[in-house]
Image (cartoon, grey):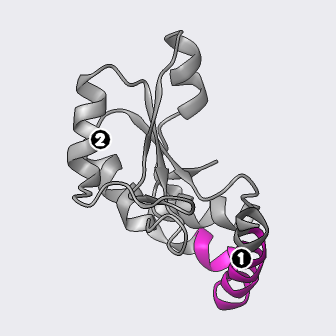
Amino acid sequence: MILDDILAHKLDEVSERKRATSIATLRERPLYQEPRRGFRPRCAAAPPAVIAELKRASPSRGVIRSHYDPPAHARAYESAGATALSVLTDERFFQGHLDHLVAVRGASACRASARTSWWTRIKSTRRARSRRCRAR
């Protein structure tokens, strides 16, 4: 089952990232201390909140957006009224990257959050924060 494959891969990926970079190292990166834009308060302030999802591919359908331009898509979603943006950063199954989140954050005033997976661990949150972004 695809969810089992994703879970097994993510557990290995998170373990490897923990070994490669300590949380202390992430905290020392310059962008970690930068103020973050509040995701939850922004959504609560403007009900109903629309959270637009940016992703290039899905595990079940493959590539769903061959011309994937995260900053352009973020601006389009913002123009259409999105309150916040959820950016898929998983590389293997969704063809995302943390750099997509960074690019989106620079292109839009919408709050952007890394969507690593529904089992995101503290390490993924700290990794996103070290690039002045959020993870959920």
Q: Which residue is mark 2?
A: 74
> For the residue marked with disc 2, what is the amino acid?
Ala
Q: Secondary structure at mark 1?
A: helix
Residue 33 lies, with reference to residue 41, above or below; the image says: below
* Along the viewing direction, whichever of 1 and 102 lies nearer the viewer: 1
Tell me: residue 49, above or below residue 7. Answer: above
Provide residue 112's location: percent of width, then percent of height: 45, 42
Q: Is residue 38 left or right of residue 16?
A: left
Q: Quadrant of residue 129?
A: bottom right
The tag on residue 124 is none
Q: Overall secondary structure of the magenta stretch?
A: helix
> Which residue is painted at 30% across and 31% down in the image?
77
The residue nearer to you, when weighing 58 against 110, is 58
Residue 58 is left or right of residue 6, and the answer is: left
Residue designated by label 1: 14
Magenta residues, start to end:
7-27
Nearer-N-terminus badge (1/2) = 1
Disc 1 marks which amino acid?
Val
| Count of numbered circles on the image | 2
The image shows residue 20 at horizontal and vertical percentages of: 65, 90
Which residue in the rendered view is the most extreme toward the top?
A: 47
| Residue 18 vertical placement versus 99 (above, below) | below
Instruction: State the image coordinates of residue 42 (x, y, percent, origin top left).
Output: 51, 23
Q: Residue at x 72, y 52 (%)?
A: 118
Crowding near the residue tagged with mark 2, few <14, some 14–19, many ≥20 C-alpha atoms within 10 Å: many
Label 2: which secondary element: helix
